[in-house]
Image (cartoon, rainbow, N blue to C red):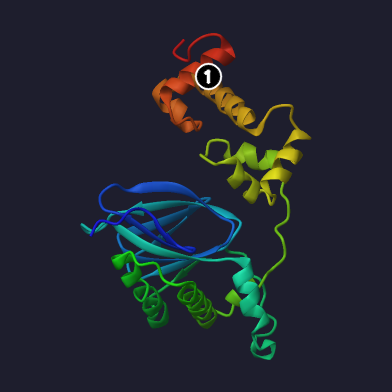
Amino acid sequence: MAYPDPINYSGIFLSWYHQNDTKCIHTNADHNLIYLYSGKLIIEQGNKETVINPGECVFVRRNHRVKMNKLSSDGNGYKGISMTFKRNVLREFYNKMDKKSMPKNVQMPEKSIFKISLRPDITSLFQSLTPYFDSLVKPTDEIIKLKEQEGIYCLLNTDKNFYPVLFDFTEPWKIDILDFMYENYMDDLTMEEIAVFTGRSLATFKRDFAKISDLTPQKWLINKRLEVAYNKLQSGNKKVSDVYVEVGFKNLSHFYTAFKKQYGFSPGK
């Protein structure tokens, strides 16, 4: 059947792409566990790529920015389900655990992406969710809670390194706003996403940004993109049709208008 995209059942998402591949910047304020039914998922973080094939699973830690390429493969469209683990769910689970049974002296791993090969417990978990999406009948809150708990147990049984990852309830450290924006100005991020990645609420982000710039964050990003575009075009080795995409503009006419307003002449000149 043709699924709407995506379907969200209280933090459990189905993504389904029949023909068109898609690439998006994924922001995750919460941990995510993604299971692939068909197609291919390529996750980019910095210079590293993680490839997920059907029957495999990947865990992406919260407060990290990754690029996800959801692709067709072997004639099959992309189909995957992701499960989000919010802090209140993890905290409730942790409070009920027998702390004596937890492994000792497990260090917090540095990596943020954990590829999980085929496992019967994880396969069973996600296959049990399929009927709800096939029928478009939303599972009850009690069922969702049970599935979340099952997902947590699956991770803990997979690797003891998930103990410090899942049960770390410290707030993320704030990182330098301008450093982040200089590095990511070309990406299609909302203000809410930038706030999350710099360890702030949206209100705190706007307040902190006002301390370092007279511009709004949106205006700062446009000015930065125009500045880089100007330098690229001035070198004479770049076409306007290439540059506007490279610096983060999504619309060519918008780029022309903004560039001319900023510099007094069109980018073609």
Near-viewer residue (95 or 250): 95
Q: Quadrant of the N terminus?
A: bottom left
Secondary element at image label 1:
helix
Vertical placement of residue 125 versus 175, above or below: below
Residue at the limit of the structure toward the right, as seen here: 211
Q: Percent x, y for residue 71? A: 32, 53
Q: Is residue 208 left or right of residue 184?
A: right
Which residue is under mark 1?
Answer: 258
**Numbered marks: total:** 1
Which residue is depicted at the point 37% across and 79% down?
124
Which residue occupies 75% across, 39% down?
207
Horizontal relation, residue 89 to residue 24: left or right: right
Name the residue: 35% across, 67% down. Answer: 137
Above-or-below relation of 228 to 7 = above
Q: Name the residue type under label 1.
A: Ala
Q: Is residue 237 visible?
A: no
Q: Position of residue 44 (x, y in %)?
A: 47, 53
Q: Residues within 10 Å of mark 1 (few under 14, many from 20)?
A: some
Image quadrant assignment for residue 77: bottom left
Which picture quadrant has residue 139?
bottom left
